[in-house]
Structures are given as structure tokens and as C-alpha cells.
Image (cartoon, rainbow, N blue to C red):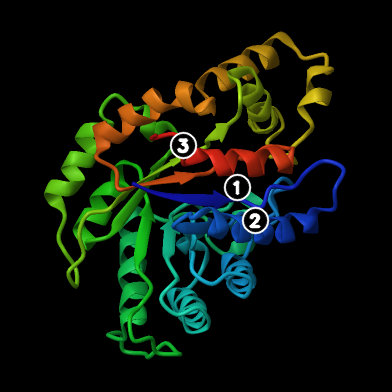
């Protein structure tokens, strides 16, 4: 089992927003030292709680501070871009950090209607997305009518951030998949993954590859881990209330808030479902999903206000499977 990290460049209350980016770089350096296989970054636009809107730029900075760990996007939201531009960005990254670049692709558009309009795209059907993925792959492989440069000896491997339709598309195109969120709790997750493997059509020798993305937070006690998870859970609760995803806040300050009954209920439900606990507590939960899906890789995507606690959690994630 390979272990990797996804970092969303979360902003933190009381700190300048731009500090989230060097924080991501430092986390990547530590991840390489810990033996993680990949370090992926995200793309979000005009979100107060996330500083990373340009994965290729951040990956270039991380590449200059690391030597071995694979670098990738979780993911580039392809409907927001022209395939040629994405191809050029990731071919440049491949030239700067040879043999270390991954291209994870998603289909999500901007968070709100004004953002979608500013990005120039208000909808993207499954088939439109499929066409653009094929176009991008042809550009990376040098088989398109235009030649994206610099030409790479081997193009960066592509992965899809997938749900139901995404799994089908990944199987048709012979791509690896990344599964996370509610998909992991679905009763039929094993059937979906089995169908992906059965329908998989290899491309240039590719094989099915399943990565599970979990917001893992590991601590000495379950109570401590739940406290770490509170920062992100509260951000999700606030986003549902206000439509804006906020910066991470100190759990101690959050505990002092006078919450409404609905907010308390949502917080408790969020904490109950969080992937937070000791290695002993989390291990059986994680193993059940791994066994059901036959996953090849675990992508830890946890975040919390306390950066030292997050570093400790990163160091302990690989204890989960003994």
C-alpha cells in the first residue's frame, strides 16, 4: 500500500492568506522525508479558506525544494481551462522535475455562479469533459494536430477524481481513479470499483489504479483527534450556512462559541463521520474500505488549525496499516 498526501493550502485565522502557500511547500518537504509516495495540491477559485488556485505554479515551487516525491494535482478542474494550456503547464513541470509529475483531473466548475462566469464556463456535461480529457491526453502524448511543448519522453500519467460517471469514463479511457468523500461511504462502493475494473480498457499498457482519498487525522487519543477535526468540520458547517468556505479556526475558540441547535447537530454529525482517531481506532475502518475496493493507494487529505499537530498526524498516518 502506498501512502500519499493531498494538501489544499488551507488558510488559517489570524495568519496572512499567502502564508498558506509556503506552508504547503514545507509540508511537501516533510512528506518526502517521511517516505510518502506523492504530494498533490488542489485548485479552488476565490475561496476564502483555500489559497491555491493555480496547482502548476505551486507544484513548480515544491519541485525546487524536493528531490524524489511525486508531485501532482488533486486536481486540475479541466472545464476551467483549455486543454492546450494544461498540457503546456504540465509538460513544463515534467521538464523541470523529470519523472515525478502526475496530472489529476476533476470536472467541478467554480463554487458559485459569479466564479463560473468569471472562469468562462457555466456547465460541463460528462461527454464534454470526456472530449476534453481525450484532447488533453493527445497533447501530452504528442498525437494531437498541434504539438504542445516542451515535448516529454514520457507524458505525465493522468488520473480522474471520480464518482459514478467518473468511474465509467476512467474505465473507458484507461485511467486511474481517485475516490473520496461520500463515495467511500456508499453501500455499493465495492460494486462501483469492481465495475470500473471489469470495464477498464488499457491505454498504452495502463492498468486499473484506485486511490482512496480520506481526510485522515491521527492523534494519541480519539478525543484529541476529534478536536483536530473540529476546525475542518466547522468550516463545512459554516459553508452550508453562509455559502462561503472559511479559514480554519482554533478549536479552543470554536468550543467557546454559542452555537445554534442546528449548528451543534451538524458539528456532531461531522465529527462522528470524520476519519479522525488513534491508529488503533482508525485501522479497522480504513481496512474495511481498502478491502472492499482493493485500493492501490491511500491519499491522506486531512487539515487542521494547528500545523504542528498536522505534522504529527502526517507522521502517524502510515501507522494505520501496521
Residue 157 in sight in this render: yes
Q: Nearer the viewer, mark 2 or mark 3?
A: 3
Say few, some or many: other residues with alpha carbon within 10 Å of mark 1 (under 14 / 14 to 19 / 20 or more): some
Q: Nearer the viewer, mark 1 or mark 3?
A: 3
SS type, badge 1 = loop
Measured along the vertical axis of the image, is residue 271 above or below residue 18? Answer: above
The CA span between labels 2 and 3 is 34 Å
Q: In screen coordinates, is 119 left or right of 82?
A: right
* Residue farthest toward the right in the current orientation of the protein: 14
Q: Return the residue nearer the eye: 115 or 150.
A: 150
Image mark for residue 132: none
Q: Which residue is mark 2?
A: 45
The CA span between labels 1 and 2 is 7 Å
SS type, badge 3 = loop
Determine contact: label 1, label 2, CB under 8 Å.
Answer: yes
Q: Return the residue nearer the eye: 42 or 29.
A: 29
The quadrant in which residue 155 appears is: bottom left
Disc nearer the start of the sequence (2/3) = 2
Residue drawn at (72%, 43%), measured in percent from left and top? 307
Q: Locate residue 63, reporting x and y percent.
A: 58, 72
Q: Locate residue 52, reporting x and y percent.
A: 65, 58
Q: Which residue is mark 1?
A: 111
Measured along the vertical axis of the image, is residue 6 above or below residue 133? Answer: above
The CA span between labels 1 and 3 is 35 Å
Image mark for residue 319: 3
Amino acid at each position: 500500500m502506498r501512502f500519499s498526501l493531498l494538501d489544499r493550502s488551507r488558510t488559517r485565522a489570524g495568519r496572512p492568506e499567502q502564508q498558506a502557500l509556503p506552508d504547503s511547500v514545507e509540508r511537501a518537504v516533510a512528506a518526502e522525508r517521511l517516505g510518502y509516495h506523492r504530494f498533490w495540491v488542489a485548485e479552488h477559485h476565490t475561496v476564502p479558506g483555500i489559497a491555491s488556485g493555480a496547482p502548476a505554479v505551486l507544484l513548480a515551487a515544491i519541485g525546487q525544494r524536493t528531490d524524489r516525491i511525486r508531485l501532482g494535482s488533486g486536481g486540475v478542474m479541466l472545464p476551467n481551462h483549455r486543454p492546450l494550456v494544461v498540457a503546456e503547464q504540465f509538460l513544463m513541470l515534467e521538464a523541470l522535475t523529470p519523472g515525478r509529475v502526475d496530472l489529476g483531473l476533476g470536472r467541478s466548475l467554480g463554487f458559485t455562479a459569479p466564479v463560473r462566469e468569471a472562469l468562462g464556463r457555466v456547465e460541463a456535461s460528462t461527454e464534454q469533459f470526456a472530449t476534453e480529457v481525450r484532447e488533453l491526453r493527445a497533447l501530452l502524448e504528442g498525437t494531437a494536430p498541434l504539438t504542445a511543448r516542451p515535448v516529454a519522453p514520457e507524458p505525465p500519467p493522468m488520473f480522474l477524481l471520480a464518482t459514478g460517471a467518473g468511474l465509467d469514463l476512467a474505465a473507458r479511457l484507461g485511467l486511474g481513479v481517485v475516490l473520496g468523500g461520500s463515495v467511500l461511504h456508499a453501500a455499493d462502493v465495492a460494486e462501483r470499483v469492481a465495475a470500473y475494473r471489469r470495464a477498464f480498457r488499457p491505454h498504452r499498457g495502463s492498468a486499473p489504479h484506485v486511490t482512496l482519498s480520506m481526510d485522515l487525522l491521527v492523534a494519541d487519543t480519539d478525543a484529541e483527534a476529534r478536536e483536530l477535526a473540529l476546525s475542518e468540520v466547522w468550516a463545512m458547517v459554516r459553508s452550508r450556512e453562509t455559502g462561503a468556505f472559511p479559514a480554519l479556526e482554533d478549536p479552543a475558540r470554536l468550543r467557546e462559541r454559542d452555537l445554534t441547535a442546528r449548528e451543534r447537530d451538524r458539528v456532531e454529525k461531522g465529527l462522528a463521520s470524520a476519519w479522525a482517531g488513534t491508529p488503533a481506532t482508525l485501522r479497522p475502518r480504513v481496512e474495511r474500505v481498502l478491502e472492499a475496493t482493493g485500493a492501490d493507494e491511500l491519499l491522506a487529505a486531512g487539515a487542521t488549525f494547528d500545523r504542528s499537530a498536522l505534522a504529527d498526524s502526517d507522521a502517524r498516518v502510515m501507522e494505520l496499516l501496521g
